[in-house]
């Protein structure tokens, strides 16, 4: 709610625009009260082009004036993958070698202007000017460096200082700064604020803001098959974005490939590469600030708000064909960029295949009666078909665990840890994630694995989900079970556990509890999965649970002297899934 109020104040300021100094009580509420630095930093970045000396010389007559410009931080264009130290729109604002500035070591060096991209007005203040010496100074505002829109004007408003430890010529610390106003301009325009000391007419202090056109651009493409490269790109960007290639980093001395090997842009994708991730050049502070539209021929999905990642647009399950991805920022909808690409159809999706398939289908109909005659061959084919379905169901179960949603939820968790500078947890997360991928893909080659290995895979998965949602879980096993000798169908419980996490306890966070118990009753192993979620009414009979039903039905067709039963019950305080492995210990 507080953010909405503050944004509303800024929008109101946009209507006041460059006449803010002429309005009574025109000081932005954030700047009118002392110690609002945290709220200001939440909405603004601060730009200054000179640094005041900590203690001015004793023989100095007047304060140095340091202009400070507070601007929106919705878009950051100077990423490690898209260096724009030399922004062409800022050329006219470069500082001359004879100009009396102490240059900051900021992103846009040797310029008196900051680039802006949205309609949020800027706030300009001046250190060194207060209510005591205000009569010494005048200011004016220029549009595009030449058109005077506010003539030389006396300074009327003041606010508490934003930065401490700045001093007046008499050695006292500055407590107050001049509030020059709140200003905004349409795209392709600039404002320049100039301040002069009436006692020193040949000295003018100035600072500028330039509103310029920008739209997202695709600098790399990835598919689920290249997920490792995408993880590396994330690591590279978080390593170097803040300080650059030569500076220190959050990752210390970890070696990463050069940027030239990381970013590859493809425009043709195979039929099985139809889940595509488009990596963007600029960074925004909110995914909702990116909007996109996908055009295929005369059809389009319409403008859609991005909801995946601040750097990535993810398009899923694309049919074969030619596409154009249109992109824009929500705060600058008039500027649109495009990226064209195509998904190549598989051989069985082509027209000629449809014709050939029809011919073959007719021929196969003529041959059916021969297959029926051979009973033994029919039984053998049926058994092979059932075994194939069992294997396919197991593979689907493995893959369902690593669908792109889960992989990129894990990526977002890693990104969040790195943002918090929690490198140790991020490394631990990456290690657990890699181990889970490696072990699950390895075990997917088998129909059955030892109970100990199956529990280990489940434990790895829950550790990753626990890091995201903070719930508690426990896995217990009866001491009479030899978990290294007993074999179970690989990851049979996984879809149920994932359902318990997603629909049961994820929303409870630290109050969520998941229990997995393996007990013995006669010759049977009883496995229960219990959570304290909302109960049976919230259980979704989705893909994962249907996969479990189908898989158990197929298993019971091929098991000899053994079977698997399962059911889900509402316990009143949550949900319990019960698995009975009959005659598993006989």
Image: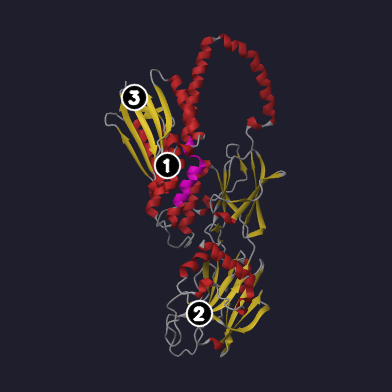
Q: Main secondary structure of the magenta part?
A: helix
Q: What element carries label 1?
A: loop
Q: Is mark 3 on a helix, strand or loop?
A: strand
Q: Is residue 319 above or below residue 198?
A: above
Q: Do the residues labelled 2 and 1 touch (CB within 8 Å)?
A: no
Q: How far apart are marks 3 and 1 (CA)?
A: 28 Å
Tag 1 or tag 2, which sits nearer the N-term? 2
Queried whether the magenta region covers residue 421, the answer comes back as no
What numbered label is drawn on residue 237? none
In magenta, the rendered stretch is: 399-414
Q: Mark 3 points at which residue?
A: 524
The front one of 554 and 433 is 554
**Picture coordinates of residue 109, whole percent (x, y):** 54, 70
Q: How far apart are marks 2 and 1 (CA)?
A: 55 Å
Q: Name the residue under label 1.
A: 533
Q: In this view, does 525 lie above or below 60?
A: above
**Picture coordinates of residue 477, whole percent (x, y):** 31, 33
Q: Name the residue under label 2.
A: 177
Circle 3 or circle 1, nearest the eye: 1
Q: What element carries label 2?
A: strand
């Amino acid at each position: 709610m507080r953010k909405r109020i503050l944004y509303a104040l800024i929008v109101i300021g946009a209507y006041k625009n460059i006449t803010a100094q002429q309005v009574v009580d025109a000081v932005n509420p954030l700047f009118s009260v002392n110690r609002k630095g945290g709220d200001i930093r939440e909405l603004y970045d601060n730009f200054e082009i000179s640094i005041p000396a900590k203690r001015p010389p004793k023989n100095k007559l007047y304060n140095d004036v340091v202009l400070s410009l507070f601007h929106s931080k919705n878009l950051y264009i100077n990423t490690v993958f898209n260096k724009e130290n030399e922004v062409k729109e800022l050329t006219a604002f470069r500082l001359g070698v004879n100009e009396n500035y102490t240059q900051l070591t900021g992103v846009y060096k040797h310029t008196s202007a900051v680039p802006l991209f949205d309609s949020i007005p800027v706030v300009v203040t001046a250190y060194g000017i207060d209510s005591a010496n205000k009569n010494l100074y005048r200011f004016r505002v220029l549009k595009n460096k030449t058109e005077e829109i506010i003539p030389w004007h006396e300074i009327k408003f003041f606010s508490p200082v934003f930065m401490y430890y700045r001093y007046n010529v008499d050695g006292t610390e500055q407590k107050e700064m001049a509030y020059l106003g709140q200003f905004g301009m349409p795209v392709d325009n600039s404002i320049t604020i100039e301040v002069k000391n009436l006692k020193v007419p040949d000295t003018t202090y100035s600072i500028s803001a330039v509103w310029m056109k920008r739209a997202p651009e695709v600098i790399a493409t990835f598919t689920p098959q290249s997920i490792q490269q995408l993880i590396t790109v994330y690591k590279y960007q978080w390593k170097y974005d803040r300080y650059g290639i030569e500076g220190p980093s959050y990752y210390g001395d970890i070696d990463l490939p050069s940027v030239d090997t990381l970013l590859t842009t493809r425009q043709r994708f195979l039929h099985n590469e139809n889940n595509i991730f488009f990596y963007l050049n600029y960074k925004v502070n909110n995914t909702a600030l990116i909007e996109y539209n996908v055009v295929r021929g005369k059809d389009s999905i319409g403008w859609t708000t991005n909801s995946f990642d601040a750097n990535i647009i993810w398009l899923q399950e694309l049919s074969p064909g030619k596409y154009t991805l249109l992109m824009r920022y929500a705060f600058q909808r008039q500027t649109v960029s495009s990226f064209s690409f195509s998904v190549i159809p598989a051989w069985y999706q082509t027209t000629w295949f449809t014709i050939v398939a029809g011919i073959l289908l007719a021929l196969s109909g003529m041959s059916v009666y021969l297959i029926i005659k051979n009973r033994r061959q029919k039984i053998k084919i049926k058994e092979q078909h059932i075994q194939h379905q069992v294997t396919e169901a197991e593979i689907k179960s493995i893959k369902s665990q690593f669908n792109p949603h889960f992989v990129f939820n894990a990526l977002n968790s890693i990104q969040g840890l790195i943002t918090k500078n929690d490198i140790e947890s991020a490394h631990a997360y990456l290690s657990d994630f890699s181990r889970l991928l490696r072990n699950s893909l390895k075990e997917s080659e088998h129909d059955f694995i030892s109970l100990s290995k199956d529990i280990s895979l489940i434990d790895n998965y829950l550790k990753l989900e626990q890091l995201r949602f903070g719930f508690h879980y426990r896995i217990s096993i009866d001491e009479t079970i030899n978990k290294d000798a007993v074999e179970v169908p690989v990851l049979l419980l996984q879809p149920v556990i994932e359902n318990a996490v997603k629909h049961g306890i994820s929303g409870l966070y630290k109050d969520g509890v998941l229990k997995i118990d393996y007990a013995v009753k006669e010759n049977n192993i009883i496995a229960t999965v219990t959570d304290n979620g909302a109960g049976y009414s919230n259980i979704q009979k989705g893909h994962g649970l249907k996969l479990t039903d189908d898989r158990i039905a197929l298993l019971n067709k091929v098991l000899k002297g053994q079977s698997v039963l399962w059911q889900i019950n509402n316990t009143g305080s949550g949900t319990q899934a019960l698995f009975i492995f009959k005659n598993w210990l006989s």
